[in-house]
Amino acid sequence: MKTHALAIHGGAGTLVKGMMTPELETKYREDLKLALESAYNILKAGGSAVDAVEKAVIDLEDSPLFNAGKGSVFTATEAHEMDASIMDGKTLNAGAVTLIDSVKNPIRLARDIMDNSEHVFLAGEGAMEFAKLRQHVMESPDYFYDEFRHEQWLEIKDSDTFQLDHSVKKDSKFGTVGAVALDIEGNLAAATSTGGMTNKRYGRIGDSPIIGSGTYANNKTCAVSCTGNGEFFIRAVAAYDLACLIEHRGWTLEKAANAVIHERIKKINGEGGLIAVDRQGHIAMPFNTEGMYRASIDASGRQIIAIYK
Ligand code: ASP
């Protein structure tokens, strides 16, 4: 059966419901819809899952509402360190980048590493050198500056804590972004991009750029993009674990996705969620936080845009 499907997320751990204004909620929904539909158009026109997930993530990186690209959070040293990764389920090829700044669209860089280098994962200075060589668009710190995020950081900068950008009580924003897709050729792909966690230590790497933890795709099973406290998703090898539950236990996508978020991640006290799509176009979007910015169009064409449970 030739079908296609897509899901995107803008991070788990949203504002507590009472703090979200109707105007802000509308903005979130609009930006999610925009990213969803622009990527879906690629699939509808017969384009590849890899192109679709890259496009969705680019749109979300360009929105100041989400913690990726433009809206990235501040690190403990008042800087931005971004991470991103992408995986093609057909070839099991992957590209990932970590500890970068200035690059307007980290997901484009991850894609470029996948397509045009012999490597999978580039970090820091080496990644920046590759980005310059390949002429990726760079932006000044002003582009990434956001007053709200800066305030958010000022509140916890002298503490040892670091947090999901959205878990601050007075927060009015965002999360890591990601996308998963199935194209009409039956290929799956996943992509994830993030600014990480507010006040994270210099050099800290989360799950988002780690293939198998924050991102995974395999045509045999499913495509997955995670969001939440990266430390827990790394320890749980969450995205790959989900694929293994399908491959080795024969579980449905729904059952496997719920087990990862509501049992395995929860058991080690991790907070977060994920989006996943399988080869039949089923979609799962479980989370164990108050909300997760998410949107999807399944194989039957049904569209969902949601924030809370
Ligand atoms: N998973 C991301 C990280 O730990 C954060 C998030 O999903 O918001 O870097």
Image (tube, rainbow, N blue to C red):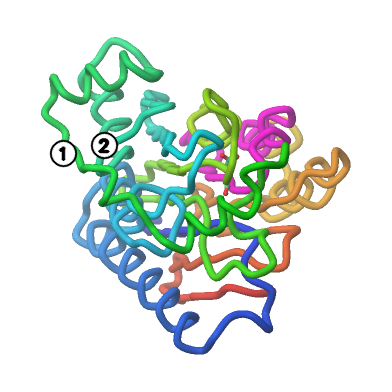
Q: Secondary structure at mark 1?
A: loop
Q: Residue at x 41, y 33 (%)?
A: 87
Which numbered marker is on residue 205? none
Q: Quadrant of residue 28?
A: bottom left
Q: CA distance from mark 1 to mark 2?
A: 6 Å
Callout 1 environment at 10 Å: few (<14), some (14 to 19), or many (20+)?
A: some
- Residue nearest the viewer, comparing 255 with 111: 111
Q: Residue at x 19, y 60 (%)?
A: 45
Residue 90 included in the magenta stretch of the image: no
Percent coordinates x, y for residue 35 in the rendering: 33, 64
Mark with earlier residue (1, 2)? 2
In the displayed structure, would residue 283 be above or below residue 106?
below
Instruction: Identify which amino acid the numbered label 1 is placed on.
Output: Val
Q: Which residue is mark 1?
A: 137
Q: Residue at x 52, y 38 (%)?
A: 75
Q: Secondary structure at mark 2?
A: loop
Dot 1 and dot 2 residues touching (CB under 8 Å): yes
Q: Is residue 97 left or right of residue 136?
A: right
Residue 225 included in the magenta stretch of the image: yes
- Residue nearest the viewer, comparing 82 with 253: 82
Percent coordinates x, y for residue 268 in the rendering: 85, 38
Callout 2 environment at 10 Å: few (<14), some (14 to 19), or many (20+)?
A: many
Q: Which residue is mark 2?
A: 103
Percent coordinates x, y for residue 63 in the rendering: 33, 62
Q: For residue 283, say whether it is visible.
A: yes
The span picked out in magenta is: 217-244
